[in-house]
Image (tube, rainbow, N blue to C red):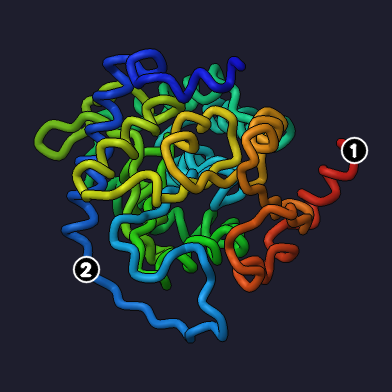
Amino acid sequence: MAALGWLTPRRRSATARSVLAGEASAEAARKSSQEATEVSTTSEASEAEPEFPVLGDEKAAAFFDLDNTVMQGAALFHFGRGLYKRKFFETRDLAKFAWQQAWFRLAGVEDPEHMQEARDSALSIVKGHRVAELQSIGEEIYDEYMAERIWPGTRALAQAHLDAGQKVWLVTAAPVEIATVIARRLRLTGALGTVAESVDGVYTGKLVGEPLHGPAKAEAVRALAAAEGLDLTRCAAYSDSHNDIPMLSLVGHPYAINPDSKLRKHARQLDWRLRDYRTGRKAAKVGIPAAAGVGAVAGGTAAAIALHRRRR
């Protein structure tokens, strides 16, 4: 029954800082989406129109967690690697990032303490740097470390929503600047991410509210849906982590992607759809057509498969 607590009114699961972080992220996401150059994409029509996502439903959208849902590993770690390469910080700091990434991959879940340490380190590193500078570097880091780590299966799910004429947003605790780069490269609508405070285009080393994590993600989705005129009961959300149950519980179509053990259990209890791209396994309850899963096996690296087998 504890898991069902996420279904209670917002005040019981979100703090004032969560609401602030969510609203700030939604505002940043809408602004970046409006400023971005509109990219048109085409796709061949399938022989049979799938029941979901619903073609032309303007009240529906899809929200995708990033780390281990869309991309293997943590975006913040890969961003740290790129900054280290550019002499932003010392070797000992990289070792800390590496340990946090190793924990994330081995445990398959986000450790709150490690995530907080990583964010604190990132804030201290970027303090005094210009926002434009980090945005430009983010483009380079995506090509160097992230592009090859996108799960093809999850990318196909996002494309199914785009092909249906729906907007698709990343929702992540990663900095909104790097999240926006990833969203643009994947030709998604935009990104909700952690908003770092800046004055006159320079980072102050502080956050607006708190990291976009847990209840804050739900608040960001709620705020964006209100601004965009979306019906959350017709929207979909995708995540690997039980920390995102607040976000998943908001929508009418929640999906557990590469789920950790807690989310897998919760999803089965509530009859949510499941899909796991780490081993090529495909759960029985999947609403997206099978064609969207092409390349799922290729999406898991040999190292990830070997690790899973050892853990079994």
Q: Depth check: 258 or 225 in front?
A: 225
Rendered position, 240 above or below 3: below
Residue shown at the point (35%, 27%) measured from the top left: 123
Residue shown at the point (68%, 53%) measured from the top left: 285
How far is the residue under mark 2 from the one under mark 1?
Answer: 46 Å
Under tag 1, what secondary structure? loop
Crowd rating for badge 2 (residues with CA inside 10 Å; few <14, some 14–19, many 20+): few
Rendered position, 154 above or below 105: below
Residue type, numbered disc 1: Arg
286 sits to left or right of 185: right
Q: Position of residue 91 (x, y in %)?
A: 55, 31
Q: Quadrant of the N terminus?
A: top right
Q: Which residue is mark 1?
A: 312
Number of numbered discs overlaid on the protein picture: 2
3 sits to left or right of 258: left
Q: Depth check: 42 or 208 in front?
A: 42
Q: Position of residue 260 (x, y in %)?
A: 68, 35
Q: Quick check: can you spot residue 147?
A: yes
Q: Depth check: 230 or 298 in front?
A: 230
Q: Quadrant of residue 26?
A: top left
Residue shown at the point (39%, 82%) measured from the top left: 42
Residue type, numbered disc 2: Thr
**Residue 37 disc label:** 2
2 or 1: tag closer to the N-terminus: 2
Q: Position of residue 80 (x, y in %)?
A: 48, 39
Q: Quick check: can you spot residue 103?
A: no
Rendered position, 108 above or below 160: above
Residue shown at the point (34%, 49%) measured from the top left: 191
Q: Depth check: 94 or 99 in front?
A: 99
Crowd rating for badge 1 (residues with CA inside 10 Å; few <14, some 14–19, many 20+): few
